[in-house]
């Protein structure tokens, strides 16, 4: 890796390893990390030079990051090449990542569960399976609805809520019984 500080190189390598766990390739994770750390937008050639990747791998990684909505184009005056950058707001990056994970993983699972739960169970073992799948569906549906509500909160409010952690239970317990739901 050219022209990267030891800290940046370590982060880029780590992001590549983590990318595989997040549903993207190692190279895509590394490209994201490089763009995240870069003070200015980069084009594909800059990324090839910095990371020592092939042009085709960089192109595929940029396409993947665009499909995740984790990068944005940043046109440069007088230059016809495409330049890319990450959003400055880390809360927005997290929101986009979670929205895409939900779209790619949670929503298809909810769809499948709805389908299998709407057909009649014919045998006892199917009824037991449906009961377990109903519990899973109810949990995923609740998390999905909660996420819709959380997205309406400002980053500042969301941060305050997160900092409350388990102390939020005390707030809920202090509510009158009819207002706890």
Image (cartoon, helix red, strand yellow):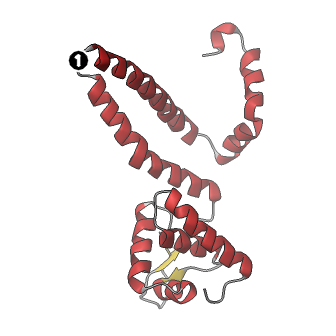
| 156 over 83 or under it: above or below | above
**Hey, which residue is sitting farthest front in the picture?**
125
> On the picture, is 120 further left or further right than 127?
left
Q: From the image, which quarter does the N terminus lie in?
A: bottom right
Which residue is more in the foreground, 123 or 11?
123
- In which image quadrant can residue 110 be found? top left
Viewer-side residue, 66 vs 61: 61
Quick one: SS at disc 1? Answer: loop
Note whether residue 142 is visible. Answer: yes
Which residue is found at the position 38% from the left and 82% from the top? 56
Identified at 62% across, 68% down, the residue is 14
Give residue 33's position: percent from left, percent from top. 59, 71
Camera-side residue of 22 and 38: 22
Q: Answer left or right for 139 relative to 112.
A: right
Residue at figure coordinates x 73%, y 80% from the top left? 6
Q: Position of residue 89 (x, y in %)?
A: 63, 60
**Farthest residue, direction top:** 177
> Mark 1 = which residue?
120
Task: Note whether 55 is above or below 141 in the view shown.
Answer: below
Quadrant containing the C terminus is top right
Residue 64, percent from left and from top:
41, 67
Residue at position x 52%, y 54% from top?
97
- The image quarter containing residue 36 is bottom right
For label 1, the crowd category at 10 Å Cα-Cα, with few meaning under 14, some 14 to 19 and many 20 or more, is few
């Amino acid at each position: 890796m050219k022209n990267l500080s030891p800290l940046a190189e370590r982060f880029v390598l780590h992001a590549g390893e983590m990318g595989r766990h997040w549903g993207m390739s190692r190279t895509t994770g590394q490209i994201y990390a490089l763009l995240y750390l870069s003070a200015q937008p980069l084009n594909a050639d800059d990324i090839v030079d910095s990371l020592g990747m092939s042009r085709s791998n960089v192109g595929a990684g940029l396409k993947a990051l665009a499909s995740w909505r984790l990068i944005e184009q940043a046109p440069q005056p007088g230059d016809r090449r495409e330049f890319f950058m990450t959003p400055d707001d880390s809360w927005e990056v997290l929101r986009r990542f979670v929205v895409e994970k939900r779209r790619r993983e949670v929503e298809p699972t909810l769809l499948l569960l709805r389908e299998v739960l709407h057909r009649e169970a014919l045998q006892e073992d199917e009824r037991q399976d449906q009961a377990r799948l109903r519990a899973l569906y109810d949990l995923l549906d609740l998390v999905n609805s909660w996420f819709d509500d959380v997205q309406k909160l400002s980053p500042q409010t969301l941060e305050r809520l997160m900092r409350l952690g388990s102390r939020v239970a005390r707030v809920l317990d202090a509510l009158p019984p009819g207002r706890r739901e």
